[in-house]
Image (spheres, rainbow, N blue to C red):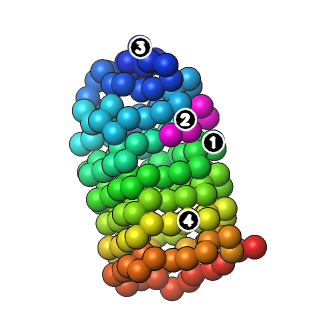
Amino acid sequence: MTDHFVIKDGKLIEYCGPEEIEELVIPEGVIQLDNYSIRRVKYCVKSVIMSESLTQIRDAAFREFTNLEKVVLSPNLTVIPEACFCECKKLSEITNTEGLTEIGSRAFEATKLQKISLPNIEKMGVSVFKYCFDLETVELSCKLKMIHYCCFGYCKSLKDLKLRE
């Protein structure tokens, strides 16, 4: 339902629907998600489903969404920007990661992720998974040229890091 969204030229400007929602579905036709366009639901939304048309997310768009548990990425999204899901302390599931080629610094810092597969990742910033205390399994692409310092800092449960052809 696009009635609750202000969209201009493919850019989601503002979500103006009810604040007490548990699932946020980014509607088809949205190409870009601005970093403050959905802030009014940051304390209640538990899951986000991104439409196939979404190709860009701005830095810190979901930062500190305190109850966010699950995100279904757009298959056409290639970049997770800096601090995008930083401090989403309940975030434990990210799906549809096959299209990702780049992840910005601190993108998943301090989340509850236990596992993540990034089969096409080529570039990752600093501290991407820092403070992910529950992270156990990570699958990365052999296309990745460098893992920055502190990428997995304080990931005390990390047991399995796989490189995939």
- The quadrant of the picture occupied by the C terminus is bottom right
Lower position in the chain sequence, tag 3 or tag 1: 3
What segment carries the magenta color?
51-56
Residue drawn 38% across the image and 35% down it:
34
Dot 2 lies on which element?
loop
Q: Which mark is residue 3?
A: 3
Residue that badge 4 annotates: 123
Q: Image point 44% across, 18% down: which residue? A: 8
Q: Where is residue 57 shown, x and y percent of the image? A: 45, 42
146 up-or-down from 82: above or below: below
Name the dominant secondary structure of the magenta segment. Answer: loop
Disc 1 residue type (three-letter): Asn
How far apart are labels 3 and 1 at the CA level?
24 Å
Q: In this orientation, which residue lies closer to the viewer: 21 or 117?
A: 117
Contact check, label 4 and label 3, Cβ < 8 Å: no
Q: Which residue is mark 1?
A: 76
Marks 1 & 2, CB-CB < 8 Å contact: yes
User: For the residues carrying marks 4 and 1, which lies nearer the camera in this image?
Assistant: 4
Q: Amino acid at mark 2?
A: Leu
N-terminal of the pair, mark 1 or mark 2, is: 2
